Image (cartoon, grey):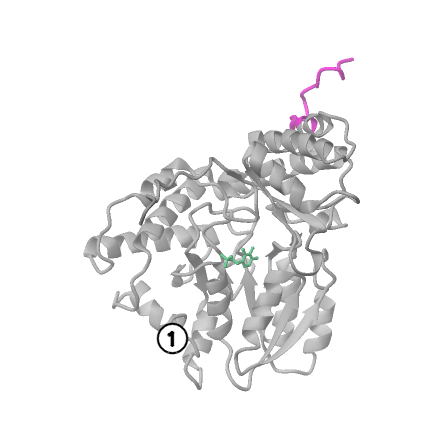
Amino acid sequence: MSEQIGELLPPPRLMLTPGPSCVDPRVYRALATPLVGHLDPWFTTMMDDVQVLLRRVFRTENRLTFPISASGSGGIEAAVVNPLEEGDEAIVCINGWFSERMAIIAERTAAKVHRIEAPYGRPVDPEDVRRVGRGKKVKFVGLAHGETSTGVIQRLDDYRKVADELGALLVVDAVATLAGVPLDVDRQRIDICFSGAQKAISAPPGTAPITVNARTEEVLRGRKSKVQSWYFDLTTTMNYWGKERTYHHTPPVSLIFALREALRLVLEEGLEARWERHRHNQQALVAGLEAMGLEFFVPNPADRLITVTAVRVPKGIEDLKVRRQLLDEFNIEIAGGFGPIKGQIWRVGLMGFSSQFNNVLLFLAAFEKVLLDQGFHVSAGAGVAAAVRASLKPQSVAIGERK
Ligand SMILES: *Cc1c(COP(=O)(O)O)cnc(C)c1O
């Protein structure tokens, strides 16, 4: 090699994307923990800790709760291929890219899949699920709790009710919501729930926590055929994460160390306090964007996902130029839209360690500057001022409002 490949020195980015989110320094430190073997008794004890922490974060007593060695999409894969086999019928609620992915994976199984679609920016109507499922032997109702591609949240209890009527398992993609938005696996009776480490949990990407209840375990034991995927077969992976601790595959040891520390941070803060922090910062962001004259992609405020806010790109403004300038000038990364809404929306993520009020203020100030440079008329400071006002405690009085 004629030229030397230099040291790794990434720019100090602020990731305000729908993942990966920024990571607490304590998690980086855990990531650098010296390796031990994955069958070492010390490591297997540490695995118990991770499972205890995950159960607390998912709010479940489920035995089968552990991190899959994969990104969030591996969570979808495991949640879909384990319960479904030949002769089954499944309903997948689609309102964006990730719920679509669940349908695409389901269609690769031998099961019959019914797609129920909602326009982008809206939740799927539970009534449509009821109507399509009526008279059928539906085994599986799957949906995304938070659809990250459009910034929509769906009310799980409504789908649980329909799944109960149909006698189906409720399968929930909580990749964008776990540890950022209220979610209670046992109380909401979710049969299979999975997430991704790099979103509101704020660990590095590469593990997908999953939890499966006793009813689902029963379904898995009753399968007539083998799970089509060897790697994602929960019944065998569980022998490693279960009592036996027998070798299945080598897990990403360092990522599990990091996940453990991230989960400890979640519980130190407290789930309720964390949900409230996410809500508070998103409200400040929304107030700021609104004051800047921007429009939201999700029309109904009650449907807006707290962890990802989707804003419309104003007419005459180029999506990519804005994102490029934010990155080059301010080291801030936000996301665009993909699929049918490419170029039409920006998605601002406030997840986990990234969800901080100072990040909201910095982003709004930088965004105003960039939009002004790109020719969008906004009165400078309007966004920041509105965010500050929105964040004040009820008893505080802002300067200028004093009587
Ligand atoms: C990010 C995301 C995924 C995919 O996760 P990867 O880690 O990119 O594989 C799936 N579902 C939802 C809702 C997501 O936000």
Residue at image x 41%, y 55%? 206
x and y percent of residue 242 in the render? 31, 65
Image quadrant holding the C terminus, namely top right
Name the side, left or right, on which 126 lies relative to 145: right
The front one of 133 and 333 is 333
x and y percent of residue 301 in the render? 73, 46
Residue at image x 72%, y 64%? 118
The front one of 356 and 20 is 20
- The secondary structure that most of the magenta stretch takes on is loop
Where 331 falls versus 84 (above or below)?
Answer: above
User: Dot 1 corresponds to which residue?
Assistant: 230
Residue 136 appears in the picture as rendered: yes
Q: Quadrant of residue 37?
A: bottom left
The front one of 347 and 129 is 347
Query: Which stretch did the figure color magenta?
Result: 388-403
x and y percent of residue 281 in the render? 61, 36
Membership of 392 in magenta stretch: yes
Q: Residue furthest front?
A: 2
Name the side, left or right, on which 203 lies relative to 98: left
Membership of 48 in magenta stretch: no
Kindly tell me whether mark 1's CB lies below 8 Å from ligand 1.
no
